[in-house]
């Protein structure tokens, strides 16, 4: 019984770390399609101690986080990308790919606005390397497009 009580605050902390990556609590709730507008505040104040499975599923779908990470704290916050990104991108419908890109842009913008919250979030150690690689690929693609 005591292990259940200790796991609940950890789940709340993980949800709060996800919400911190959005510009506002409202933006997080909208992304997750959670209709309880005080949910994040209730987590912070301990009024919600055990989010239900429906709410957890909405958070996983809305943020793209790993369900295993959200429930247990094990693994990475976000699932690893497929090994063959070119095949995955080709198989993904273009509008879904664009929607993912727009979501990533919103996340980056929100993180820039709330950079002070980054000190409270446990980030994967390889995040700077992955971001550097992505930046390099984007710049190379932009240069190729300008040279045509």
Image (cartoon, grey):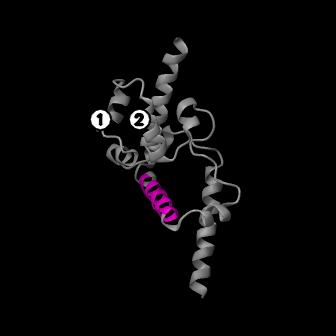
Provide the secondary structure element on which disc 1 rests: loop
Residue furthest left as drawn: 37
Q: Are marks 2 and 1 in contact (CB under 8 Å)?
A: no
Provide the secondary structure element on which disc 2 rests: helix
**In the displayed structure, would residue 41 be above or below residue 19?**
above
Q: Residue 38 has which mark?
A: 1
> What predominant SS class does the magenta segment belong to?
helix
Residue 122: x and y in percent read 56, 39
Give whichever of 120, 63 is nearer the camera: 63
| Circle 1 Cα neighbour tier, 10 Å, few/some/many (<14 / 14–19 / ≥20) | some
Task: Residue 68: name its quadrant.
Answer: top right
Residue visible at 47% across and 23% down? 8
Query: Which quadrant, please, contains the C terminus?
Result: bottom right
Q: Which residue is mark 2?
A: 55
Give whichever of 100, 27 is nearer the camera: 100
Q: Which residues are magenta?
A: 96-110
Residue 45: x and y in percent read 34, 26
Residue visible at 57% across and 76% down? 142
In the rendered image, residue 118 lying in the magenta stretch gets the answer no
Residue furthest top as drawn: 1
In primary-sequence order, the first of circles 2 and 1 is 1
Left or right: where does residue 54 sit relative to residue 122? Answer: left
Residue 72: x and y in percent read 57, 29
Give the Cα distance between marks 2 and 1. 13 Å
């Amino acid at each position: 019984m005591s292990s259940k009580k200790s796991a609940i605050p950890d789940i709340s902390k993980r949800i709060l770390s996800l919400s911190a990556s959005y510009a506002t609590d409202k933006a997080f709730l909208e992304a997750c399609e959670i209709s309880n507008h005080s949910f994040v505040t209730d987590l912070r104040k301990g009024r919600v101690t055990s989010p239900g499975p429906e709410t957890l599923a909405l958070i996983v779908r809305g943020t793209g986080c790993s369900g295993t990470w959200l429930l247990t704290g094990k693994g990475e916050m976000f699932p690893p990308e497929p090994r063959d990104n070119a095949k995955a991108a080709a198989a993904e419908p273009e509008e879904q790919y664009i929607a993912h890109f727009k979501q990533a842009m919103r996340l980056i913008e929100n993180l820039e606005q709330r950079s002070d919250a980054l000190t409270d979030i446990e980030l994967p150690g390889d995040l700077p390397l992955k971001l550097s690689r992505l930046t390099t690929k984007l710049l190379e693609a932009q240069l190729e497009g300008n040279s045509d």
